[in-house]
Image (cartoon, rainbow, N blue to C red):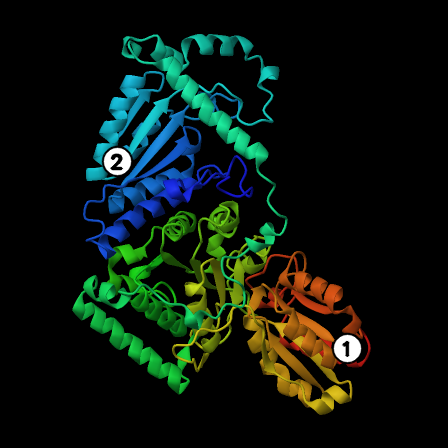
Amino acid sequence: GTCRGTGGSMHIYDKDTNFQGGWALVCEQLPYAAGAARSILLDRMLKPDEHKDDDRIAVVFVGEGGAQNGRMAECLNAAAKEKLPLLFIVIDNGRAINTFTPDVAANNDVYLQGQHYGVPGIKVDGGNLEETLKAGRAVVDYVRSEGPAILQVHTYRFQGHSPADPEHERGRKDEKKWARAEADPIKLFEASALADGLDLEGASKAAKAVVKQSLDFARESPPPPAELAKELEFPDPPDTDYNTRGVMADAAEVTKRTTNPERLAACQAHVAELQALAVKGEISIADAVNLAVLEEMLRDPTTVCHAEDLQAGSSYNIPKLTQQTFGTLRGADEIIDEGHFLGKALGEGMNGYRPIVEMMNTNFAIYAMAEISSAGNTYATTGGQFQMPLTIVGAGGTAPNQALGAEHSQPFHAYIMGIPGLKIGTAASPDAAYGMMKSMIRDNGPCFLFLPVKMMKEVKGYAEVGRCMPINKCKLVHKASDAAVAAGKAVTVLTYLHGLKEVQSVLAEIQAEGLDIDLIEMRSLKPLDMETIRTSLARTHKVTILDESTNSGGVGATVSALIHEQCFDLLDAPVRRLAMDDAPVPYASSMELAVVKRGTDVVQAVFDFMLKKI
């Protein structure tokens, strides 16, 4: 079928007919549809001649129960604010799986939800074909010319919620007998004067023939090959060279035509200043990411950016000058709900755009877990029909003496490690942040770049202007001396984010004792660069991991397991994990010592290896 056996009945997509999916998580489709509607406006802005007669709208279906979800309010606000061509169709069958909606919802007139935002709505009887057609046409005309609207269609559900729903066990036989006679819209239409003179029998036979043809096709088709699952993991192979990736032929002209000349010049001057800092070795991690974002938005007009406090540059200036230069469609300042604006970005990614989503703090992305999960899965579940270019970037992690408390010190990078289809990277230096950010923006799949929250402005260095860096490689930051290796006094140390600075701060102390380390920065958490790790272990035969995630379910647990599985023959001792304790991270530094590991723990681990305590 259209999804090559990957989606199933809950995930049906057909790019050729602009059908962009049945989504399994209730209401997650709402922000995706808002993103699709924004893409229509972006198309008209960037290619006015091609879309001068464009009357497309985005249509999203949701149940009357699902419409009680907070995503509905967020998307009504977004649609109203930007006058998006978006039609919300609410299929109101009065039930959850079995519970009657009025038993759990205070307001069943969903069409009135838009009043607070100036979004009109109407409710129709779905059993009345003529009334539904008239209302539908009027609403579509309104959306095309004015903006968002809600159409609530009251109907009846004849089948169970799913094949696993045993409706026959819940006493609905009499109800269904009544419904087939009194609530079937097809039978009601056939019995009306509107059906006089129509060849309904011929139409029914034609429809059944199409259904039979489709079933025959499904039965006769061979099953998809097993290897297809792995082929659909990423749109771009992990070793892609993004320096060779091009843009549309008229990209420079489109950028010039759609950007105010004075603001474009101001942006270019700012970019030149940052590039000069990068060449001199004086650019910060935050400014390096801002430079990458602006360069890519100047280079490719399909690149867009979403963030809270975007006009002011957010907390670290990552989206600085995006809206001032490129306008509100390409530089979108967002209401404080990460899930809905990451969802809008997903909808844009499905429709030919390259969205960047800046999280002020990566822990805030907890609100967007459903959308991140779907971003990772969509390329595969659509059978490869829809690529998913989407770059999420933000400051996070847990530094010693961070003093941000538990909620702002969670290891979100570990939380998302199990989501398929994501490329997850970390950058603890300006050159890595700049080069990896550029590559991720050019990647055709979803990427997440984590930056160290306590090093965003204080750490400065070089960045190779214009160069995209690999996003599937570790970095050997310091190589142990051959003498230390020969004497068996070298240890491989794996770390990332703030851990890099911690280990560098104790390197001299380790070397003063006649010991040394291979210091490897894990810039790619997924996919993991086992080749670089194995090469180091072939020299040192000992490894410790300074991990900025918890002992249970953390990054270090995964890396340790892979090392034991794939490099066991190289180990002289078990892997030593220096992970955060499973207890919530305290605010007070005195208590934090018991939870967050640091450079001194690395020194002790290296000494323990030499004293054979490990």
**Secondary structure of residue under mark 2:** loop
Residue 541 sits in quarter:
bottom right
Residue 301 sits in quarter:
bottom left
Q: Residue at x 62, y 52 (%)?
A: 227
Tag of residue 119: 2
> In x, y percent, where is residue 585?
58, 60
In this rendering, the answer to whether 436 lies above or below 487 is above
Residue 526 sits in quarter:
bottom right
Residue type highlighted by circle 2: Val
> In x, y percent, where is residue 170?
59, 16
Tag of residue 608: 1
Alpha-carbon neighbours of circle 2 within 10 Å: few (<14), some, or many (≥20)? many
**Secondary structure of residue under mark 1:** helix
Alpha-carbon neighbours of circle 1 within 10 Å: few (<14), some, or many (≥20)? few
Q: Residue at x 38, y 18 (%)?
A: 203
Q: Is residue 441 left or right of residue 366?
A: left
